[in-house]
Image (cartoon, rainbow, N blue to C red):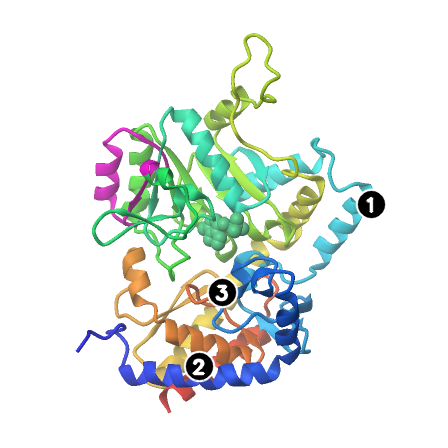
């Protein structure tokens, strides 16, 4: 007999989850006929009927077609309304159509979306980012993926080295360099297909929360950048140990490498991100997603020393060199730092993602954690509800995971899938399978109560 895939969860609970999923998928199909027909028709124009292939595989159920949203809720083509605890995987933590963003987009669009020149908002966005994260200088892209791509290149020029260290359980965007993992035999394995295999030679993947492994790898002297999430959020939730934080703060720089902290997700769970919450001291900080309330933007924060490297290595048009010119850094893009992104980020940071609103997210996060724990205890399941600010994680193991491997091993896909579709059919849009629900800046107490009550119904169905 083969070993159970989920040894930490009672087999009857898994079996119930599979049954619930089957039933709820049938109900979902009944509730979403228009979306389903739209997808069939759209397949004539797009692979899988979607404008980005990922939309087809993000959830176990077929995608619904979105029509409109306001605050914490959105509506699909069939008129179903959902209260959103996924926040588009943190791309929309400001909620849908937030008034300050709508106003900023409208005002800026009347003046012009973009000039390929600085607009005055840029310096205010930098000031607001410095106030929040501490780093003094900033550059901009259109996504967090773009920010990580450029930050790695800057680190290479700053150090004259190539290798990038990342940690198991990470996700830093769809850039070849970071989409590698260690396989069981110790080799490098692509997380996805279509990657340039040569990038595996300049990437290494270490266990998270392992200062010994970090020091040993840094000692080889080839590392340009250590790229790390301030807490792992793409494999469940893993918090950094104080020893790991100390090692990142001291060992990386001592080895002549650059520390890049990726705050793309954690910045929306706790104000100032894990950088402030855990006391990280990065040379560079990357982020993106919801800063502009849904208007694309990526940000790179940097120390004055790194900013000097960027300033001294400006790009030239290839082929238009004057004597004495040297090749510049491969960073930037024609739509990067456009006026619309800057206007949206300015009001996002100043009016939506404020310290006071961050405290509210924390309070609602506590309310969600307490309410869910009560429901889990009520049905007698031995689970723990973990939390980082407004971000919740259902933990099904007695111990909190310390790295990506432990965290992935603790996730139970049939349970996450069943919960997602059960909640969906009752008007609650849950997080993707590798995450727990996030309290966005648009969520209120009634939304939190709805999540708790619907989860209670799900737990009843699971244990009845
Ligand atoms: C930590 C982290 N960094 C970077 C990214 C890439 O973000 P985007 O897809 O918006 O470029 C993600 C996306 O989930 C992420 O979780």
Q: Pick out the residue farthest to the front.
A: 44
10 Å neighbourhood of mark 2: few (<14), some, or many (≥20)?
many
Q: Which residue lies under the disc numbered 3?
A: 57
x and y percent of residue 331 in the render? Answer: 54, 31
x and y percent of residue 114 in the render? Answer: 73, 38
10 Å neighbourhood of mark 1: few (<14), some, or many (≥20)?
few
Q: Pick out the residue farthest to the bottom.
A: 464
- Indicate whether 307 appears above or below 412: above
Q: Which residue lies under the disc numbered 1?
A: 110
119 sits left or right of 149 in the view:
right
389 sits left or right of 4 in the view:
right
10 Å neighbourhood of mark 3: few (<14), some, or many (≥20)?
few
Closer to the camera: disc 1 or disc 3?
3
| Residue 21 marker | 2
Residue 203 is one of the magenta-drawn residues: yes
Mark found first going from the N terminus, 1 or 2: 2
Residue 2 in view? yes
Magenta-drawn segment: 201-225
Q: Tell me if label 3 and label 2 are in contact, CB under 8 Å.
A: no
Q: Secondary structure at mark 1?
A: helix
- Indicate whether 328 appears above or below 237: above
Closer to the camera: disc 1 or disc 2?
2
């Amino acid at each position: 007999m083969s070993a159970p895939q989920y040894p930490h969860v009672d087999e009857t609970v898994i079996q119930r989850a599979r049954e619930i999923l089957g039933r709820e998928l049938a109900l979902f199909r009944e509730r979403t006929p228009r979306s389903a027909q739209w997808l069939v028709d759209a397949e004539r124009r797009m692979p899988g009927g979607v404008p980005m292939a990922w939309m087809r595989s993000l959830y176990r159920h077929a995608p619904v077609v979105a029509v409109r949203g306001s605050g914490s809720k959105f509506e699909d083509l069939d008129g179903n309304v959902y209260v959103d605890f996924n926040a588009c995987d943190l791309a929309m933590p400001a909620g849908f159509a937030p008034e300050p963003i709508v106003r900023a987009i409208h005002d800026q669009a009347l003046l012009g979306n973009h000039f390929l020149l600085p607009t005055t908002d840029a310096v205010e966005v930098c000031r607001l980012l410095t106030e929040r994260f501490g780093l003094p200088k900033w550059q901009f892209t259109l996504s967090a993926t773009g920010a990580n791509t450029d930050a790695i290149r800057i680190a290479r020029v700053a150090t004259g080295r190539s290798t990038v260290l990342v940690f198991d359980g990470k996700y830093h965007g769809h850039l070849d360099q970071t989409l590698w993992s260690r396989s069981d035999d110790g080799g490098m394995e692509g997380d996805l297909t279509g990657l340039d295999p040569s990038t595996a030679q300049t990437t290494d993947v270490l266990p998270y929360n392992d200062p010994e492994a970090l020091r040993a790898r840094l000692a080889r002297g080839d590392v340009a950048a250590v790229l790390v999430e301030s807490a792992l959020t793409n494999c469940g939730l893993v918090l950094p140990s104080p020893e790991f934080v100390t090692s990142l703060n001291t060992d990386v720089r001592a080895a002549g490498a650059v520390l890049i902290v990726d705050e793309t997700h954690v910045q929306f769970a706790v104000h100032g991100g894990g950088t402030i919450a855990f006391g990280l001291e990065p040379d560079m900080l990357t982020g993106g997603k919801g800063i502009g309330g849904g208007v694309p933007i990526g940000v790179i924060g940097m120390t004055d020393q790194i900013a000097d490297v960027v300033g001294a290595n400006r790009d030239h048009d290839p082929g238009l060199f004057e004597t004495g010119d040297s090749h510049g850094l491969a960073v930037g893009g024609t739509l990067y730092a456009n006026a619309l992104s800057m206007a949206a980020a300015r009001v996002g940071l100043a009016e939506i993602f404020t310290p006071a609103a961050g405290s509210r997210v924390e309070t609602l996060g506590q309310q969600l954690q307490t309410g869910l724990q009560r429901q889990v205890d009520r049905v007698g399941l031995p689970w723990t509800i973990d939390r980082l600010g407004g971000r919740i994680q259902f933990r099904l193991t007695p111990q909190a995971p310390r790295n990506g491997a432990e965290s992935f091993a603790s996730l139970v896909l049939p349970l996450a899938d069943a919960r997602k579709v059960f909640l969906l059919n009752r008007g609650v849009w849950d997080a993707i399978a590798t995450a727990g629900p996030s309290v966005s800046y648009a969520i209120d107490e009634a939304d939190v109560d709805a999540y708790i009550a619907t989860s209670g119904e799900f737990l009843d169905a699971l244990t009845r």
